[in-house]
């Protein structure tokens, strides 16, 4: 199996943490739809998550087979380890 640098795991963990916050805020906002502070926090984390994912994909390739990144002449999907391999 391909050895990945430590920053791969660190950045992936940051993405997972930010997305966890988004899930929790979504659940909270489902029951508190007028909480402006929670909505602001949700928007900040959504932007932060997108920033983390863009940086990650620039360095390590796509997180999903579709999404924010475009392909180049070297089709890269599937070259990185699958989630269960890390």
Image: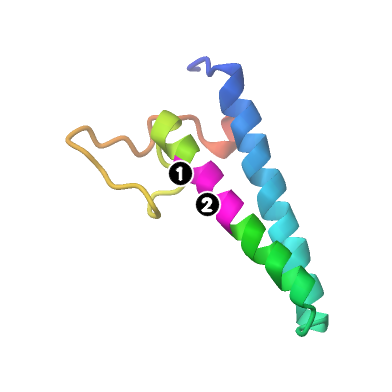
Residue at image point 25% right, 37% down: 75
Left or right of 67, for residue 21? right
Judging depth in this view, the residue of 64 and 24 nearest the camera is 24
Residue at image point 63% right, 65% down: 43
Residue at image point 61% right, 36% down: 12
Q: Position of residue 83 (x, y in %)?
A: 57, 38
Q: Position of residue 22 (x, y in %)?
A: 69, 60
The part of the chain drawn in magenta is 47-54
Where is residue 86, by image quadrant? top right
In the rendered structure, does residue 52 fall within the stretch colored magenta? Answer: yes
Residue at image point 17% right, 35% down: 73
Which element carries disc 2, helix, strand or loop? helix
In the rendered structure, does residue 55 fall within the stretch colored magenta? Answer: no
Q: Position of residue 21 (x, y in %)?
A: 74, 56
Determine the CA span between mark 2 and mark 1: 6 Å
Q: Which residue is mark 1?
A: 54
Which element carries disc 1, helix, strand or loop? helix
Left or right of 4, for residue 57? left
Q: Specify few, some or many for label 2: CA neighbours under 10 Å numbering under 14, 14-19, or 20 or more.
A: some
Mark drawn on residue 50: 2
In the rendered structure, are the residues bearing label 2 and label 1 in contact, judged by CB atoms less than 8 Å apart? Answer: yes
């Amino acid at each position: 199996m391909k050895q990945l640098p430590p920053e791969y795991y660190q950045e992936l963990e940051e993405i997972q943490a930010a997305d966890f916050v988004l899930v929790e805020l979504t659940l909270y906002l489902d029951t508190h739809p007028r909480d402006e502070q929670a909505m602001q926090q949700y928007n900040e984390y959504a932007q932060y998550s997108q920033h983390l994912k863009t940086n990650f994909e620039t360095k390590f390739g796509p997180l999903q087979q579709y999404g924010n990144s475009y392909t180049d002449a070297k089709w890269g999907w599937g070259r990185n380890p699958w989630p269960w391999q890390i």
